[in-house]
Amino acid sequence: MKSKVIFAGLMASAAFFTLLGYELMRSSATVLFKAAYGAERLPWVMACMPVVVLLGVWGYGQLLSRFGPRLTLQICSYASATLMVLGFALLKLEMIWVTPLLFLLKEFYVVLLIEQYWSYINSELDASSAKKLNGPITGIAGTGGVIGGILVAQLAIPLGTHALVLLAALVLLPSAWIANYAYRRFGEPALTTDEPPKSLGEGIGWESVQRNPKLLSLLFIVIASQVTAAVLDFKFQLILSDAFVGRIDEETAFQGQFWFVLNLVTVLVQFVVTPFLLTWVALRWVHLMMPALHCCTIAWAVIEPTLFSVGLAFFLFKVFDYSVFRGAKELVYLPLGFDARYRAKEFIDVFGYRTSKGGSSLVVTVLQNLGVLMSSYYLFIALALAGLWSFLVFPLTRPEKAIEER
């Protein structure tokens, strides 16, 4: 067990630095894009995410077949840092056209790296140790996000927003080194085949997903959950704008406090609640608990749509998404083979996550341009998708003997 704890600590540390850098990159890239093109263009750039992610996951699959998981992670890490440095240089030359590219990069690189960490974690931990360690792993990693948020607040004005992009690139260096050390010390999972993928679906992991009912259910759960998150966020932002009309600084302070408290609560849940639930409660009930809770909070927001009720629904969704759902979701991959853990996982947790976010933004934008008052339907959409999530839990958590990976 001692070696597993050391391994978990190393991978959690790599994720810590990655998420610390992501907070620097997320805030700076978003602000720089809005300053260049306006906040109203955000849904349009987000609508490009499915294409970017599809190409990125395909490229990841090609690297994985050619170089294996260790070198693929190193290539992805250093390539991301290099693109950030290049973006910083172009910004210093006042080439604002690079801002949407940086925005898309910050949306993609973090999930690509984090999910590769988890692919390796799922390859090295067994179910018993994972139930105890997944929570602390996410807790240590999440602490990086908390510290990153503090650094943004402290450094943005004296250094400038542009400089945060460069700092985000530098923070990726210890992440890459720690992850590489973990691979060197604990070994590298063997590829199931040396042959390159014979089709696009095989290369991006789709064929592995569609052959396994559990993975297919997990993909649909991820899509439903992320669309739920998107519409709750849209509604929350609208209510905030109405509550703080003409008080921009006060709204910024409120949002900063909201995310700071959310991140702190998430870390506490990751260290305390997640290990308890995953160790002592059946996995099916853990997975059912989350959409059931969301249905209750969203239903209250539908009945009484106030800043507090909508904010609470969004707050709890994010807390459980980053903690319990993350830990419980990873247990699904543990008994599966290499392709499921390294290819199908990237398709579900990278392509599925970001495509859901980008696709929902595109649909909302199109319908609004057609005259549909989407703000009136956000909470109803969230409630319906949380209900669908509950239904999908049953095929996801069907006993192993009833489902075989083919």
Image (spheres, helix red, strand yellow):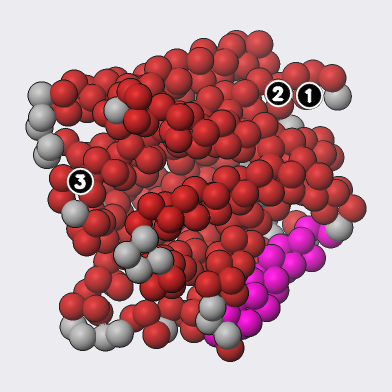
The residue lying at 37 percent from left, 80 percent from top is: 375
Residue at mark 2 to residue at mark 3: CA–CA distance? 39 Å
Q: Which mark is residue 9?
A: 2
Residues tagged 1 and 2 counted as in contact (Cβ below 8 A): yes
The residue lying at 18 percent from left, 21 percent from top is: 89
Identify the image quadrant of residue 198. Answer: top left
In the rendered image of this protein, does residue 299 appear above or below residue 322?
below
Foreground mark, 2 or 3? 3
Identify the image quadrant of residue 121. Answer: top right
SS at circle 1: helix
Residue at mark 3 to residue at mark 1: CA–CA distance? 45 Å
Q: Do we see residue 303 in this rendering?
A: yes
**Depth check: 118 or 27 in front?**
27
Q: Which residue is mark 3?
A: 35
Q: Where in the figure is residue 294, as x and y percent of width and height?
A: 64, 71
Crowd tier of the residue under label 2, counting other residues whose Cα lies within 10 Å: few below 14, some 14–19, many 20 or above:
some
Q: Which residue is mark 1?
A: 5
Q: Where in the figure is residue 196, as x and y percent of width and height?
A: 37, 32
Tell me the magenta residue range.
Answer: 282-302
